[in-house]
Image (spheres, rainbow, N blue to C red):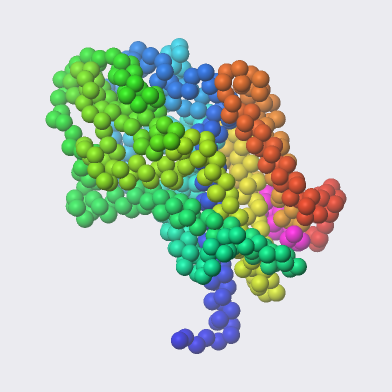
Amino acid sequence: MFSFQKIETQKLLAIHGWSGVTLGLLLYAIVLTGAIAVFADEIGEWSAGRNAEHHSAFEYRIAPIIRHLATKTDPKYYEEVALNTNATGDLIAFFHTHVKNENNTLEDYGVWFKVNPATGEVREQHEGTGDEVFAQDGESALSRFLVDMHVQLCLPDPWGLLLTGILGVAMMVAAVSGFIMHKHLFRDIFTLRKHRSPLLAKRDIHTVAGSWGLPFAFILALTGSFFSFAGSVGLSMMAMVAFGGDREKLIERLRGVPPAENDTPAQMTNMDALIADASTRTGIAPDFVGITHYGRADANLTTVHPSTDGSIQRWSFEYSLAEGTFLQEKPRIGKTPSLGSAVLDFVGPLHFGNFAGLLSKAVWFALGFSMCYVVLSGLNLWLTRRAENPSWRFLGRFAVVIGNGLPLAIVGSCFGYFLSLLYGQPARWTPIGFVSIAVLIVLGGSLVKDVQRLKWSLQLFTMFGLVILPLLRHLTGGPGWEQALQTGNVMIPALDVVLLMGGAFVLHTLHKQGALPQLIPFISQPALRGVK
């Protein structure tokens, strides 16, 4: 055993406390943004005011559009063409090749088009790397920002993925250790004792919520760690061990050995017929189409289809675009079905909760928010027991600022997005809206002395933001409920109602805690009470 002086022990406890609280709050941020990102596609439709009469650009004839775009593009970018639909139903086409960047790794570089699939009108055109050009899509800026927050906390590659992967492992350890520590797990699942002590009541609620969420937490942590580490660490390690560091050879092995190249110029067959054939095989239109070696005799077309409700598997088919023939049903990795490919088919749906449509997404959303409560309540219980120590009180304030401020900052990103629709550059102003509100939250957290009123104030402003967002969406050009329903877009009124219900829930919570009589006069005063 080590022997420390009292002051050294206090320093070690402070380091332990800061590291534990910081890790817990980062984990809270990952879980909260993940719960929101479950509905990223729906948020994209809601924020962009999408016309839902056609949910996919691939329901239109896109072959003439691609031929036209090819005439506007340098043939050196014909190596690959990535096609998908954005939040407003536009066709996104990215003609690109692969170049080595300053880090000596390959990245996509080419020409990006946004096209109205009904008319063929090119709405936007940009040239640059994949990250640069896809960031120009303003209609998807809000959903893309929320997903980026969850995936890598808006940090640059590969640091964001590494951090979220580490947090995923920490969450998995917490879930496993929590299961082991629960000597009376099945009793704790249903135990809510009536206590005179509010602290003991909070502990019971924390235990019940944590017990029910253990399997969910383990699934999220395992699948999330896989996604984070697979791209940032896993591929590099596998390439180093098995292929002498050659990532291209590794990816080639994972995708399957490509056919022999034939750069003879050739006419492309009707890709619309191939996409229609793939859609008939699955009963659903693809959400991604990839083309390799466009304009050559070895050109191939690959379709990727989302899983249908009640199914986990995503379908993918490969065709010869030069000959117009079906080649194969393509597994996730390799050329033939395998256990690894089957496992990969399960990882995505289990993490994103999209295997049963909106129903499974709603369940994942609810469980995600439950885990947020478990993380925050656990931190609060731990800090409450040490509230007499000034350093622990400061950590408690830190937890209040992050725990209650992050939802408000996310609302701020929504405000930044919608206000930018009036002036342009949503991709720029969405994160600025988040950062601006975050700075105000930190400033308020340092000025307001009463921690309880600080917590209530952040919750009250979040309530106002949630209630105002549907009106702001409409005032900045979004369709009203009647217009949205006429075009089949139920997501706009549905998410508006969810936001209003969220605001009502926060207001009810504040009223139940007796906060409003104390809080409203506090906010209305010209100077913050308790500030010297």
Quarter of the figure with residue 70: top left
**Number of numbered labels in the structure image:** 0
* Left or right of 409 in this view: 117: left
Seen from the viewer's position, the closer of residues 407 and 265 is 407
Q: Position of residue 334 (x, y in %)?
A: 23, 40
Q: Position of residue 120 (x, y in %)?
A: 43, 13
* Left or right of 417 in this view: 1: left
Q: Residue at x 56, y 67 (%)?
A: 18
Q: What secondary structure do most residues of the magenta stretch adopt?
A: helix
* Left or right of 475 in this view: 50: left
Q: Position of residue 38 (x, y in %)?
A: 51, 41
Seen from the viewer's position, the closer of residues 267 and 71 is 267
- Determine if residue 112 is in view: no
Q: Quadrant of the C terminus?
A: bottom right
User: Which portion, as a residue range, is magenta?
Assistant: 440-452
Seen from the viewer's position, the closer of residues 452 and 210 is 210
464 part of magenta stretch: no
Q: Residue at x 19, y 53 (%)?
A: 242
